[in-house]
Amino acid sequence: MSQQQAISLAFSLASSSSSSSAASSDTSCPSSPTSIMSAPVDEDAYFSTQPPPASLPAQIEASTVFIQRHAAAGRRVVLITSGGTTVPLEKQTVRFIDNFSAGTRGATSAEYFLEAGYAVIFLHREFSLVPYARHFSHSTTGSFLDFLEEDGRGNVRSKDTRMGDVLRRYTTARTEGTLLTISFVTITDYLHSLRAISRLMAPLGPRGLLYLAAAVSDFFVPESRMAEHKIQSTDVAMPADEEEFDNFDNAPRVARSKRLVIDLDPVPKFLKNLVDGWAPEGMITSYKLETDPSLLVHKARHSLGRYQHHLVIGNLLATRKWEVCFVSPGREDQWLRVGKKDGSAWTEAQVKALQAGRVPKEEPSGEVESLIIPAVRDLHDEHIKTSQARSHCQ
Ligand code: 9Z3
């Protein structure tokens, strides 16, 4: 199937899903949201100059089939983005800049969304954590093989009591076809895939959910300025006594020819295009990552005001496994926090310490995503109801 065919197929889905949602709408008539924002950034300038990943047509084909099948079954679909994007410095890439993320947030969230009845498209950084396997992969001290034992006759079984349960849940997702995994590596791969898949989700209307947990680079090297081959460090032929020195930045005396000065362009802010054009009726949730506690809520509010989407989940790098803060229009900020291991409540001083980014001595007693996903689902319920009421009024 061609990309064009895939897109038109998805759009024919739009008419059927929107008519069925209108039929079950409630009767109150909320006003339409107003957008005071400036026009979205010019997509063509970016997408026509930065080449898409080779796998994009296959991603579109798989996503189209997936979305169509689950829409027909009346299932909600969530697109989760997860892991960090890279910024390659060379076309034949040896060196790249990376964004922090192991993929824990995205992979863990995916499992809770599956449990909550969603079909999940998991757009993740290649080789970052994935749902279910995350429990046993990526150990820093050993290997997944440590979870297994062999009985001397070639039979292998699990030594870990959790494995049976995880395997059962994984098998259910496989059998029911509720999990589609798609990978990216670079920032450009990510943006092409995000645009294509969220456009395919547009026909789901308000039943589509975008949950953007990937750590996305703010800077990139445009294709037109990118070196084809590995940037050389040693073979610049220049006699030692003719080396140029440039110590304006107080760096030690390192010859200019031996330094690597990287000049990055800003990545256009596409969240506005997502809200206005790519998936205009879906619910859009983004994460905001900060390291300075005094900035977190302010920056999350700023992001919400700028893009006019539905929810920003703020988290601090140091305490992201203990707590997050929900920031959404017309609501008080809401902190979600995992309980303490001994079952006692957090004291005010401990909460202050957490919010100041100080990591507690103890491990979190559970996964904060077990609180995040039900809360997102509640907001998604409301989003669907409000959209249905609005379409009923029109
Ligand atoms: C997040 O804030 C994620 O929760 C983490 C998850 C990256 C902290 P891990 O995978 O980490 O559990 O290791 N994601 C959003 C990061 C981001 O780049 N946000 C942008 C921003 O903060 C907006 S898209 O400006």
Image (cartoon, rainbow, N blue to C red):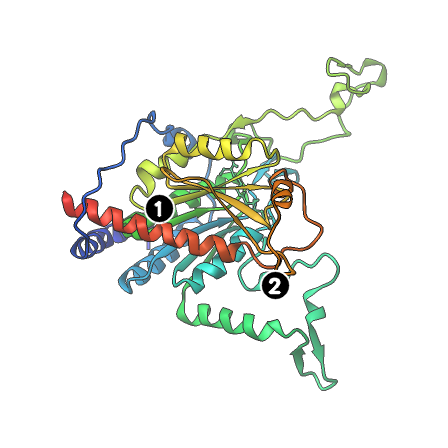
Which quadrant: the N terminus?
Answer: bottom left
The answer to whether residue 127 is above or below residue 42 is: below
Helix, strand or loop at label 2? It is helix
Q: Where is residue 234 in the image (x, y as percent from the top left)?
A: 78, 29
Which quadrant: the C terminus?
Answer: top left
Q: What residue type is labelled 2?
A: His
Q: Position of residue 126 (x, y in %)?
A: 56, 52
In the image, what residue occupies the spot 41% across and 62% down?
Answer: 116
Q: Disc 2 marks which residue?
A: 135
Q: Position of residue 157 (x, y in %)?
A: 65, 79
Which quadrant of the structure image shows residue 289? top right
Task: Give the distance between the C-alpha atoms of the residues marked 1 and 2, in whole angstroms.
Answer: 29 Å
Q: Which mark is residue 283?
A: 1
In the image, what residue occupies the spot 24% across and 54% down?
Answer: 13
In the image, what residue occupies the spot 32% across and 61% down?
Answer: 75
Q: Pick whichever, 260 or 377, lies toward us.
A: 377
Res. 7 in view: no
Res. 66 in view: yes
The answer to whether residue 107 is above or below residue 232 is: below
